[in-house]
């Protein structure tokens, strides 16, 4: 939007059905018109804008639409149904798909799908920009089909792009879009002077500020630990005692053992990634939930069997006293208070960030979404199992707790980036990308918390407070996109 406002345009961003703080879902049907709500969202936004004071400065013959991907489908539907929109630019739009033949929620959609709606009469001044090797939407079925139906202008992008072909992160795309609006509105591509694209610096500043705020959170978490009596146990104590006198043979044996542990870390991390990849390839986004259930279930089953075998071998009888001891150790009051304060640090810093960058502010739109979002618990539970119960114990050959934490953070970064890359067909979605980033930040914060508490319940509490809140804010978006994802 900033590149258009620099040229003197008023820009209004639409938070359409099932996105951000908007209610409903992507496949909602308007009861009054029996038309998809998405096909009217832009028109309703325009009517709202007309009631605002600034609109007196707007030339109503110079109102246009721009949308990307699913947003591209939205603007195509709206411009075809409302002649008030004089110019339209669609980036990699979803044009051609077949709704499922089952379920009442899709009834009434088919005639409004762009492939059934668009023609030369209702699609004047239309420009479509799409990469010929789009990895999400088929170029021929969508861009070429729209061209055949409307005789619109079509710009093909062929060069490799940062972020992938579908995202269309390109100065050329922006410049061509600006030129199209100015040519059709003002009959000139040069009326506002040369086009200088500078939006990248905004992103640089945003990420620098975000990095600074994350650093502040980590420092606050580390510093606050000094004010609490946090019980920790050191796995390295016996190791340090053994290091007093070690023979060459023992040194060689130790190196072999440490090498095996490193290999185990790589194997377990790979299994975790492959598990997510396998289930997401079978079931889409919901497959990540299934993968987490399987991973957590297998881990808990193995731990339970190992525990029972341990009791049997040592002829130990399980008692309530032992159970109380475990619960008391995990749910230490000081630890829980410390963890809650750390989570509040995160939320306060996030609110501060949102104050300067309002577009980053999201909040649960309903109580229902908060309850629905609890379904994400197995996901961060499985992640914490991987980092705290599997990988962390394998690092016990490292003396420094801080070094362990650093290695865990690096491992988390590699794993998350790998998951995002392998799931790139979903990672391009803002809500999914945002969720990945939140998971990474929370994992980093939890690593610092675990360094000071060595308590598994502490990181679960932290994850629950933060991730639950953020996921409940995007859950309607994720559910809606999940309904559409199989159409891409």
Image (cartoon, grey):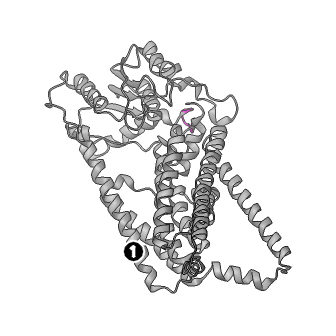
Where residue 104 appears, x then y in whole percent? 67, 35
Dividing the picture into quarters, in which one does residue 162 lie?
top left
Looking at the rendered structure, the secondary structure element under dot 1 is: helix
Q: Is residue 132 visible?
A: yes
Predominant SS of the magenta segment: loop
Q: In the picture shown, does residue 240 fall above or below 264?
A: below
Where residue 32 appears, x then y in whole percent? 55, 36
Which residue: 57% across, 32% down? 34
Which residue: 51% across, 64% down? 466
Q: Is residue 383 visible?
A: no
Q: In the picture shown, does residue 38 fall above or below 293?
A: above
Badge 1, how many Cα within 10 Å: few under 14, some, many 20+? some
Q: Which image quadrant: the N terminus?
A: top left
Q: Judge left or right: residue 398 versus residue 360.
A: right
Task: Please report the bounds of the magenta region as a residue range.
Answer: 28-35
Q: Which image quadrant: the C terminus?
A: top right
Q: In the picture shown, does residue 164 fall above or below 252?
A: above
Which residue: 51% across, 87% down? 229
Residue extending farthest to the front is 248
Where residue 87 appears, x then y in whole percent? 32, 25
Residue 438 shown in magenta: no
Q: Judge left or right: residue 374 versus residue 357.
A: right
Q: Identify residue for label 1.
A: 220
- Nearest the viewer among 397 and 186 is 397
Tag count in the figure? Answer: 1
Where residue 81 appears, x then y in whole percent? 44, 26
């Amino acid at each position: 939007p900033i590149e258009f406002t620099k040229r003197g345009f008023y820009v209004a961003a639409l938070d359409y059905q099932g996105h951000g703080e908007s209610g409903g879902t992507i496949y909602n049907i308007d009861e009054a018109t029996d038309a998809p709500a998405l096909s009217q969202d832009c028109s309703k936004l325009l009517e709202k804008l007309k009631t605002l004071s600034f609109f007196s400065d707007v030339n109503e013959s110079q109102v246009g639409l721009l949308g990307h991907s699913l947003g591209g489908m939205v603007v195509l539907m709206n411009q075809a149904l409302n002649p008030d929109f004089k110019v339209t630019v669609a980036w990699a739009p979803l044009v051609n798909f077949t709704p499922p033949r089952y379920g009442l929620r899709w009834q009434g959609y088919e005639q409004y799908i762009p492939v059934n709606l668009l023609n030369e009469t209702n699609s004047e001044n239309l420009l479509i920009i799409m990469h010929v090797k789009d990895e999400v939407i088929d170029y021929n079925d969508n861009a070429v089909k729209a061209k055949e139906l409307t005789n619109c202008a079509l710009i093909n992008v062929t060069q490799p792009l940062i972020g992938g072909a579908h995202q269309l992160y390109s100065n050329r795309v922006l410049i061509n879009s600006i030129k199209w609006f100015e040519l059709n509105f003002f009959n000139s591509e040069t009326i506002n002077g040369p086009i200088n694209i500078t939006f990248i610096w905004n992103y640089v500043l945003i990420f620098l500020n975000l990095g600074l705020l994350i650093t502040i959170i980590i420092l606050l978490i580390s510093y606050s630990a000094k004010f609490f009596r946090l019980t920790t146990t050191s796995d390295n104590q016996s190791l340090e005692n053994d290091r007093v006198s070690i023979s060459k043979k023992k040194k060689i044996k130790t190196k072999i053992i440490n090498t095996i542990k490193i290999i185990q870390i790589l194997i377990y991390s790979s299994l975790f990634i492959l598990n997510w990849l396998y289930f997401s390839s079978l079931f889409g986004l919901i497959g990540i939930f299934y993968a987490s259930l399987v991973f957590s279930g297998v881990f808990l089953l193995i731990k339970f069997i190992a525990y029972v075998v341990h009791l049997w071998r040592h002829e130990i009888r399980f008692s309530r006293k032992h159970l109380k001891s475990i619960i008391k150790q995990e749910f230490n009051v000081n630890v829980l208070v410390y963890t809650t304060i750390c989570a509040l640090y995160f939320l306060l810093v996030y609110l501060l960030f949102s104050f300067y960058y309002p577009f980053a502010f999201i909040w649960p739109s309903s109580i229902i979404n908060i309850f629905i979002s609890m379904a994400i618990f197995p996901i961060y539970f499985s992640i914490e199992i991987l980092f705290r119960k599997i990988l962390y114990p394998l690092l016990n050959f490292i003396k420094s707790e801080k070094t362990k934490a650093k290695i865990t953070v690096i491992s988390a970064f590699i794993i998350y980036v790998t998951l995002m890359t392998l799931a790139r067909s979903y990672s391009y979605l803002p809500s999914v990308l945002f969720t990945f980033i939140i998971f990474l930040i929370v994992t980093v914060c939890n690593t610092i918390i675990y360094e000071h508490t060595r308590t598994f319940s502490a990181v679960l509490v932290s994850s629950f407070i933060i991730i639950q809140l953020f996921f409940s804010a995007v859950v309607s978006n994720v559910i809606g996109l999940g309904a559409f994802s199989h159409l891409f």
